[in-house]
Image (tube, rainbow, N blue to C red):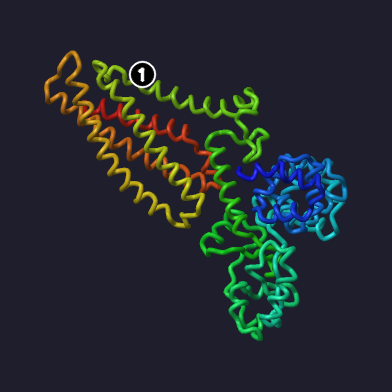
Amino acid sequence: MRYMLLIPEIRELLADGNHQDLVSVLQEMHPTDAAGVLSALSIEEIAQIFALLPPELERDVFGYLEPDVQEQYVVGAGRARVQQALLAMLSDDRAEFLERFEPRIRDQLITMLPTAAREDLKRRGAFRDDQVGAFLSTDYAVLHPNLTARAAILELRRQAPSRETIYYSYVLDRVGKLVGFVSLRDLILADEGRLVGEIMKTDLVSVSAEADQEEAARVIRDYDLIALPVVDGAGRLVGIVTHDDAVDIVEEEAQEDFEKMAGISGHGVEVGDYDYLEEPVLRQVRRRAPVICLLALFWVVTSTLIHGFENSLTKGLLLALLPMVMATGGMVGTQASALIIRALTVGDFGAGKLATVVWKELRVASLMAAMLGLIAFVDSLLVSRTSDMLDPIERVLLVSGVVGVAMFGHVVTAALLGALTPLAVKKLHGDPAMISTPAVTAIADLTGAAIYLVLVTTLL
């Protein structure tokens, strides 16, 4: 990072007492760059610098500090400085920050907060971690409908230092019910004497505090919102979800799906906390071995099935071609499963889409199966012509045709299996991400072997 070259200069300005220049240097930097510089300093130096910064800049820089530096700051900066840092943080950032600590330390930190902040944390605790109410921000801008545009801009100027965003302001009635919202752009462009109630938009898009976080992220994406209001059952505004929260949600869900599909979640490992190098070998074995051992049972069934047909696999030619058919179908099934899981995650599928999915996957799979079947046909021709004992051309064509048909049937079956299995799990209120690549491959291999061996036995 280019700003790391400023660390000696920052230390020198602090030691010389040149506080004005020190603050000016940090104000010219983006908070994430300033946090990167401060993270290289001692906790005592960070505390001295924070004491000089404006509250809003202190809040932003503190939020970008490395988590371990934040925790060290809380432990070593002293009660007064820690209390000031907590009060400067936005409500959602403060709640997330406190969750990192063990209960004993967290309880001590909560006692430093005013009653309103403690009540906010208590309300969040009533929701699950994946519900909107657990991470919404209560630092939103509020305007009265009877304010003029000029007065509203002055009011926003007053509220801005303690609000997460002022680009959207929410208009409430006397009981706190959300009746509209107005953008900063509309206020600036409006006549100064025009009332907020006349400028505001009333076609509201909102979610409830009990909604799933993925729903909030989808609404923000679909409506291209900077912030999404959150309301209770009576329509009262209780918070907002900002666009940067939506990005975090999408990343978290993607991380969670990846860890489940890779078999690295569970056993006390929180989503996003997995560290390959730090995790003990035995715990990694405990989490990965059960699934693999279970899937190995499919191979027991598959090998038993193959053994029962070994008399039909004459001269080893048909046996040599079996792995190609099984492996290709497994890859196709994995592709289909991954695409369907992604579509489910981003909300591409609505109710009643099963027939559409089946029809589309059937067409895609049939076209791929035709190409792969042709390749299998050609491959079996080449294998048969390079063997020690040459069969009559009629026999070669028959065998090659059977292999091609088996490939076609297996690819179509594997694609449908890969597509429908996640949908079935979703229908049963399970997690499609748990249908991992090894599972789909193992099931597809079993069905592929069965299709191939039945066709060989029947037609040859």
Give me the residue at 54% from left, 58% from top. 218
Q: Position of residue 33 (x, y in %)?
A: 65, 48
Splitting the image into 4 quarters, where does residue 240 fall? Answer: bottom right
Nearest the viewer among 9 and 440 is 9
- Where 72 sits versus 86, above or below? above
Q: Quadrant of the C terminus?
A: top left
Q: Quadrant of the N terminus?
A: top right
Amino acid type, residue under disc 1 in the picture: His
With 262 as the anchor, is 182 left or right in this view? right
Give me the residue at 56% from left, 38% from top. 260
Which class describes the residues within 10 Å of circle 1: few (<14), some (14-19), or many (20+)?
few
Q: Position of residue 300 (x, y in %)?
A: 45, 22
| Label 1 secondary element | helix
Give me the residue at 43% from left, 55% from top. 353
Nearest the viewer among 137 and 451 is 137
Q: Position of residue 113 (x, y in %)?
A: 84, 55
Nearest the viewer among 272 and 320 is 272
Question: Residue tagged by mark 1?
Answer: 307
Nearest the viewer among 267 and 202 is 202
- Where 60 sits versus 409, above or below? below
Splitting the image into 4 quarters, where does residue 73 fall? Answer: top right
With 365 as the anchor, is 207 left or right in this view? right
With 422 as the anchor, is 101 left or right in this view? right
User: Residue at the bottom extreme?
Assistant: 193
Give me the residue at 63% from left, 75% from top. 180
